[in-house]
Image (cartoon, rainbow, N blue to C red):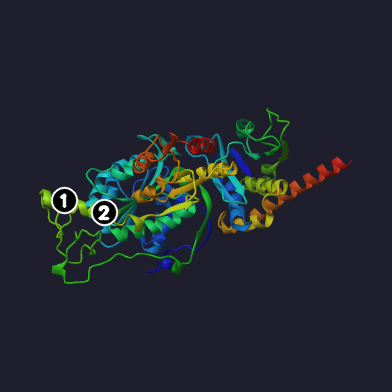
Amino acid sequence: MDIRFSGFGGQGIIKSGILIGKAASLYDNKFGTMTQSFGPEARGGACSAQVVIDDDPVLYPYIVAPEILVSMSQEAYEKFIGDPVKGSIVLTDTDLVKPATIRKDVKLYSIPATRVAEEMGNRIFANVVMVGFFLSITRIISLDAMKKALPGSVPDRFIEINIEALERGYNFGLELLEKETSTKKA
Amino acid sequence: MKADPIGVATGNHYIDGDHACAEGAIAGGCRFLAGYPITPSTEVAERMAERFPFVGGQFIQMEDELASMAAVAGAAWTGVKAMTVTSGPGFSLMMENLGLATMMEVPCVLVNVQRGGPSTGLPTLTGQGDMMQARWGSHGDYELISLCPNSPQECFDLTITAFNLAETYRVPVLFMMDECVGHMTEKVVIPEADEIEIIPRKFYQGKKEDYRPYQFKGDGSVGPMIKAGEGYNIHVTGLTHDERGYPVINAEAQDKNVRHLVDKILLNEEKIRIIEEDQVEDADVVVISYGITSRVALKAVQDARAKGLKVGTMRLITVWPFPEKRIHELRDKVKAFVVPEINLGQIVLEVERCVSGKAKTILVPHAGGWVHDPNDILNAIEEGAK
């Protein structure tokens, strides 16, 4: 599974990639390879982290056409929306991405991740809210594995609040999926 | 000897190749690092600078790469395991003192996280263009050892191997990473200290006045070292010298001295050699690769095997000394060797030389900045199988 996390510098995009790769490879018995953009293109502007998750060792480390795109900024969305393969899942921050380019061949899910984080007291948790949302929508990695991945990747005193952010995003995703199912049934 | 537990961060980690290399160095016994920061290698020095105060190591950020390599050569003669880390432009600047370290038979490790070149080239993107420079980048005749890891896990494991080889043969070992492996984050398992085998420095035990800093026995062996500052009055120099270390400027001494530098590596080539082979015995085509390219090549090999082609792989973990004898054994059995590398043809020249026209040799070049498209390697395999 090829995943691209994108946004602007300072949103914790790279950290999100690390968390996903770490949870998959240390706690979910999978192989997870993360690469990131370096240099001027990674400072400000659109930045991205790429994670390849597989049941077998990852041979080709880069991502050309992701199957999951996460965009937490307008610029990143417009830059990367052309890449995902048909049938991909695209996740965005409702308030930060107002799609100018609409792709009908991908499935779009949105969460006001930054707003949710602000309600918790600090927008710094927005990326973890998004990671939680990512977990419930994609089901590639378990919530349990992600909780185990937090220690060592976030400061010890913030683990609890990060778990809360994770769960808020996760539950938002579950509710969204439920609504979707009940709408379909109706 | 087992690793000192103080330097071994036992556990499962999710870290990049640069950080894993730093952990491997510390686990391998390195306690001195002199370097000058350069992308994409800086993270190695950053992690070691952070970790060294807790393990009794010293990091010095030097004024440049010339000084870095000189400091490493000097530090190693005080008895400590020493290393420097750089990338292409810095690697070039280190060449003169790498020659000095080679001539003084200093065990040390030089890490080069390769990026695209020449010159400043592609600071943040990958390349494998320094492989021939690793062979003979410094002037004069000599042989060194070069290792190429293809994952963060190997950046850890093989950095330990690099230090062990350096001690065994009293030689600078070049740890030839590439930006892709250096900046790639994966699971790295660091074992318990008592599972890590360390080759300690071999120190001289006899009478001070009998000590000879060098041994030119002609059998590829090396003599023990001492710690500078412990009262031995010895001479070490870049000039051609005798076993006492004193300069002797004539053809006979040159022959003994230089032949020794070459022999201690080439006579031990099969002991030094680390290559990974798969399905080469009945192969029509053997793909020879190293570093990150060996992973991408494996994808092409899997695709080729799915098409029914008989393809073997040979991964060079030690690229230098080159596994010449092994290629000789295979060259009559296969139709072709395919050599993908992230340069426009370096190691392929060595393969061609060893194959000596007895099979086809097909280069799959890439100028750098990205890894190969596996399809390009697949096409070469198909061409070779014809």
Q: Is residue A46 left or right of residue A174?
A: left
Q: Which of B255 and B278 is in front in this view?
A: B278
Res. B121 visible in picture = yes
* Residue under the point 13% across and 68% down: B209
Image depth: mark 1 or mark 2 in front: 1
Up-down relation of residue B23 to residue B140 (above or below): below
Q: Which amino acid does label 1 sit on?
A: Asp
Q: How far apart are marks 1 and 2 (CA)?
A: 24 Å
Up-down relation of residue B181 to residue B51 (above or below): above
Res. A18 visible in picture = no
Up-down relation of residue B202 to residue A136 (above or below): below
Q: In which quarter of the image is the N terminus of chain B?
A: bottom left
Q: Nearer the viewer, residue B304 or B372?
A: B304
Residue matched to label 1: B255
Count neighbours of disc 1 (C-alpha within 10 A) and say few if under 14, some if 14 to 19, many if 20 or more. few
Q: Which of B366 and B24 is in front in this view?
A: B366
Q: In which quarter of the image is residue B264?
A: bottom left
**Marks 1 and 2, the one that precedes in the sequence:** 2
| Numbered disc total | 2
Instruction: Locate residue B165, reporting x and y percent.
Output: 34, 58
Residue matched to label 2: B73
Q: Which of A13 and B304 is in front in this view?
A: B304
Instruction: Locate residue A42, reporting x and y percent.
Output: 51, 38
Badge 1 element: helix
Label 1 is found on which chain of the structure?
B
Label 2 is found on which chain of the structure?
B
Instruction: Locate residue A155, reporting x and y percent.
Output: 56, 56
Badge 2 element: helix
Q: Is residue A102 left or right of residue B105?
A: right
Q: What residue type is labelled 2?
A: Ala
Dot 1 and dot 2 residues touching (CB under 8 Å): no
